[in-house]
Amino acid sequence: MRVIAGTARSLPLKSPKGDNTRPTIDKHKETLFNCLNNYIYDCIFVDLFSGSGAIAIEALSRGAKKAYLVERNKEALKCIKENLSFTHLDSKACVVSGDVIAFLRSQAKEKADIIFLDPPFKESTYKDIIEEIVKSDVCCQSTKIIVESTLEENFDYIDGLDLEIYKVKEYKTCKHTFMQFRSS
């Protein structure tokens, strides 16, 4: 696993030991950021269930102004901090130790331009988390929400949240679903 582009290009990243995290493979990460290219520079990026921090680090490396990395696993938090330090991007990052819902309900202080969500597939509660994102202070009308999920995951319920899917990138084992608020 490595940083693909930007100021930290080609630097290797650590991944937490064990199977508690599922890092996004480089090919999928490259496709994801190609889709987000026009929105990354100078953005506020929120990485929920951050794992190794690779997604937020990629955003920072490509010019994001600030990134919030939210993770509750202690091993993963240690890995995130090491990766941020190694890539010299720690000054632009805010690492949040704790639950994603708690972050969305009370800790989020800035409006995000992009929110990336990649919960463990085994315990996925996408609907609950997306509902919290929409209600939270971190979300605004222009926020882009990207969800990594299994291919089978269905997001029909987002119509009731005033969201629309504007792009889906499918891979062999997972997909990225790009959402935004409907235009008025």
Image: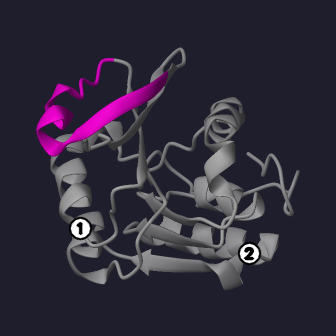
Q: Secondary structure beneath disc 1?
A: loop
What number is the disc on residue 89?
2
Q: Magenta residues, as a range?
A: 152-168
Residue at the far top: name it: 172
Q: Whole-percent x and y of residue 128?
A: 15, 49
Q: Above or below — where is 51 with respect to 163?
A: below
Q: Specify the amino acid type for callout 1.
A: Ser
Q: Is residue 8 magenta?
A: no
Given residues 122 and 38, the one toward you in this image is: 38
Q: Is residue 166 magenta?
A: yes
Answer yes or no: do the residues labelled 1 and 2 have beta carbons within 8 Å? no
Q: Above or below — where is 71 with respect to 81?
A: above
Given residues 183 and 113, the one toward you in this image is: 183
Q: Specify the amino acid type for callout 2.
A: Leu
How has the structure been colored for display? one colour
Q: Above or below — where is 150 with respect to 114?
A: above
**Going 33% across and 75% down the picture, which residue do you hit?**
98
